[in-house]
Image (cartoon, rainbow, N blue to C red):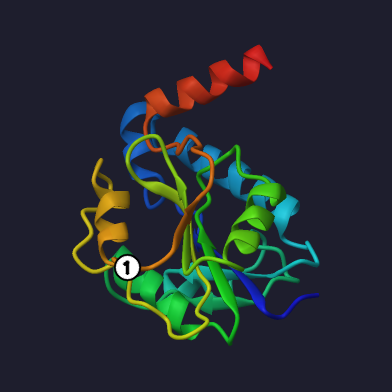
Amino acid sequence: MTSQNWLVVMSKSPRLGRVKTRLARDIGAVEALRFYRTNTRRLLSRIGKDPRWQAVIAAAPDTSLEETGFWPDHLPRVPQGGGDLGERMDNMMLAMPPGRVVLIGCDIPGLTASHIAGAFKALGSHDAVFGPADDGGYWLVGQSRKRRTERMFNNVRWSTQYTLADTMRNLAGKRIAKLETLLDIDTGADLERWTATQRKN
């Protein structure tokens, strides 16, 4: 296991009406919860035991830290802490031990271990890395933290077409790498597009 590579999975406890709320408005809370549970389990089975990094669950809410039956027992858990999404992501960047840190969520069904490996490789020669989503956001963000940990997420317009651009603006002058664009499942239309691509394959 390489202790210098930290993969932080930002994950909410699977509670009805509390996860994938935008998706739930289109397909219903029960179906949105089913998608979230299924995709999270598949994701963690793909990337949770890879020896190239140490995966860590950043759990929300903080009171869910000791819950059993959803997150794999072998993965360490840490609380996300308070604040908005940007503050919680900054918390994770600052809290991890020395080494490269990559953050991902649980709503990208196309995410594979190869993508994660590519992100850590990019951080060998860049200060930060992004996995762009086609809606203007991103499905992955990472920092090399060779010199310091940058606060990347101030004044970001979340869940908009400006999310990636706003975050990159906080890294002016830094060496930034980008991975391939993947589909982020936030709405019913996103889910339909993903399902259609799977039928073609």
93 or 31: nearer the viewer = 93
Task: Note whether residue 173 is visible.
Answer: yes
* Viewer-closest of 86 and 14: 86
Q: For the point 23% across and 46% down, which residue is it?
A: 162
Q: Can the viewer see residue 12 in this picture?
A: no
Q: Which residue is mark 1?
A: 173
Q: Position of residue 134 (x, y in %)?
A: 40, 34
> Left or right of 21: which side holds 131?
right
Q: Few, some or many C-alpha atoms within 10 Å of disc 1 (few <14, some 14-19, many ≥20)? A: few
Question: What's the residue at 60%, 81% (across, down)?
Answer: 99
Percent coordinates x, y for residue 4 in the rendering: 67, 79
In x, y percent, where is residue 33? 49, 42
Position of 194 with respect to 7 (left or right) is: left
Residue at left offset 54%, top offset 38%: 35
Q: Quadrant of the C terminus?
A: top right
Q: How many marks?
A: 1
